[in-house]
Image (cartoon, rainbow, N blue to C red):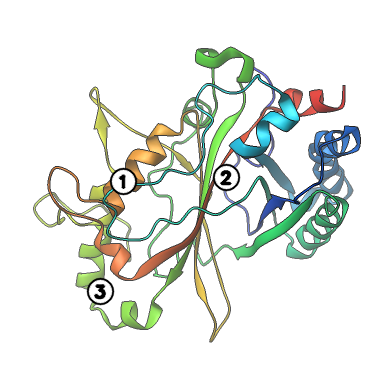
Amino acid sequence: MPTPQSGILPASSAHALFVLLRRRLGRRVDATLRAMLAAIPDRIDQVALEAPETLTLGSVGIGANAWGDLFGDARPQALRGFPRIPGAIHPAPSTDADLLLHLRGERCDLLYELGERLVADLAEWFDPVETTACFRYRDGRDLTGFVEGTENPQGDERVAVALVGQEDADWAGGSYTHVQRYVHRMNEWQKLPVKQQEAVIGRTKDTDEELSDDDKPLTAHVRRVEIEQDGEELEILRQSMPYGMPGGEKGLLFASYCRTPVNFEKMLARMVSPTADGRVDHLLNYTRAVSGAAFFVPSREVLASLSS
């Protein structure tokens, strides 16, 4: 298996930085840009080596519209843009972004410095369109107070869920990545009694136990994103983290990695658009998506090939 980029598989970090960038009009891809992109994993590794205790990790994702200029006609089988969901009741906007920088680790100052240098170096070709600094909240909870990513695969299953395999051998070790920034309506959420919050999520708030089918509404978030296909539950590897400031905007930066974009697309459709049961995710009454983008995070070997 080719080597995946370091930001995909490890357990969640204390801090993360997500930067979405868009190609500048009129700027052509050249050898300098290719070499710069190819070198980003090594630059992340260098920060990690200089301060081993920081566990600095990262991923570079490339969007469908920019892919051809970098790699030509060869592309992952399922590479495509962020889905547009027909019949959506809740917003699932698509952001015009061509490049993703996902940096994470135990020190936000080092992530800031690394992100600042990378954005500056890429400035001739890319403009940042959204930057979100995230943090771990308590024991891995969202600002709603509920644990985030409870159903994540563990151990070797993380590889099986997150990384492309021999089904698309040329792109093995890569991953389809989706990001969305959600803004929470915290005042309205905090007015709900805990029992009502638990019904919206589908899990207990304190102990993070899934509610029984009798107590879990069809509109519960857990129920909307639990999808069985051919007897198996569809899975994604979440690397989502909260963000925000006291008195200001706050929410969740959702991020997922998967060997196929289909799993995320089906989950999102069941959240925002009425399916056979005519229901949508009631969590979206208390949070809304304000951005969304899709990328492919190639293996380190594939990314390094840009400089050859």
Give coordinates of residue 89: x percent, y percent. Answer: 27, 59
Query: Between disc 2 and disc 3, whose residue precedes?
Result: 2
Classify residue 162 as left or right of residue 191. Answer: right
Determine contact: label 3, label 1, CB under 8 Å.
Answer: no
Query: Mark 2: which secondary structure?
Result: loop
Query: Mark 3: which secondary structure?
Result: helix
Classify 10 Å Cα crowding around label 1: few (below 14), some (14-19), many (20 and above). many
Classify 10 Å Cα crowding around label 3: few (below 14), some (14-19), many (20 and above). some
> Which amino acid is tagged 3?
Val
Q: Residue at x 32, y 57 (%)?
A: 208
Query: Between disc 2 and disc 1, whose residue precedes?
Result: 2
Classify 10 Å Cα crowding around label 2: few (below 14), some (14-19), many (20 and above). few
Residue 194 image label: 3
The residues bearing labels 2 and 3 have C-alpha atoms spaced at a distance of: 28 Å
- Quadrant of the drawing holding the C terminus: top right
Q: Is residue 133 above or below residue 100?
A: below
> Which amino acid is tagged 2?
Ala
Which one is closest to the eye, mark 2 or mark 1?
Answer: 1
Give coordinates of residue 34: x percent, y percent. Answer: 83, 34
> Which amino acid is tagged 1?
Ala
Residue bearing the label numbered 1: 269
Query: Between disc 3 and disc 1, whose residue precedes?
Result: 3
Hey, which residue is sitting farthest front in the picture? 26
Which quarter of the picture shows residue 285? bottom left
Along the line of sight, the residue nearer the viewer: 179 or 103: 179
Hey, which residue is sitting farthest bottom in the picture? 247
Total numbered badges shown on the rendered structure: 3
The residues bearing labels 3 and 1 have C-alpha atoms spaced at a distance of: 27 Å
